[in-house]
Image: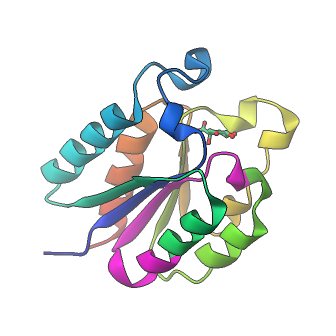
Amino acid sequence: MSKPIYVLSGPNLNLLGVREPEIYGKQTLDDVRAACEARAAALGRQIVFRQTNHEGELIDWVQEAREAASALVINPAGYGHTSVALLDALKMLAIPIVECHLSNPASREEFRRHTYVSLAATGLVSGFGAKSYELAVEAAAGLSA
Ligand code: DQA
């Protein structure tokens, strides 16, 4: 059995479903988790799915993924636009990294057009709502064994 795909989410994504649903959709993070687990299982893979509002905790999990994961899917949320420390942690990974966003940040405010995470990511899935996560898991599975 291969190592799990880590699926990490950053701040405010615990409020998915009630947070600006016109932008992020009505599905909750539990719905997203279930969809990711189902997609991974269909591909014969397992996931570790976690969310935090704390930058340091997110970085701890990225560091954990260095050894424990076969690939990483990360929705850094607001930290993608601000955190050099998160980028530094991601640069230590030798596994594929798929950056994931529910919305399409490139089509929104100017300050969302840059993410530090993109500098370390293998690829990016954005703009498909909760489906972005499923597509990112599929991409991560295809890039890793
Ligand atoms: C987000 C986009 C970010 O700009 C924003 O700060 C988020 C969510 C997304 O999934 O679309 O919190 O990462």
Residue 139, by quadrant, is bottom left
Horizontally, residue 126 falls left or right of residue 45, namely: right
Coloured how? rainbow
- Residue found at x 32% / y 71%: 144
> Residue 108's x, y, as percent?
76, 29
Horizontally, residue 40 falls left or right of residue 92, namely: left
Instruction: Give the position of the C terminus as an image quadrant.
Output: bottom left
- Residue found at x 32% / y 42%: 33
Horizontally, residue 145 falls left or right of residue 126, namely: left
Q: Is residue 108 above or below residue 90?
A: above
Query: In the image, ligand 1 is in what quadrant?
Result: top right
> Which of 84 and 96 lies nearest the eye of the viewer?
84
Instruction: Give the position of the N terminus as an image quadrant.
Output: bottom left
> Residue 82's x, y, as percent?
79, 56
Residue 119, by quadrant, is bottom right
- Residue found at x 67% / y 68%: 86
- Residue found at x 53% / y 39%: 13
> Residue 20's x, y, as percent?
61, 20
In the picture as drawn, the residue positioned furthest to the top comes out as: 22
In the picture as drawn, the residue positioned furthest to the right comes out as: 110
> Which stretch is magenta?
63-80
> Residue 77's x, y, as percent?
63, 46
Q: Is residue 70 magenta?
A: yes
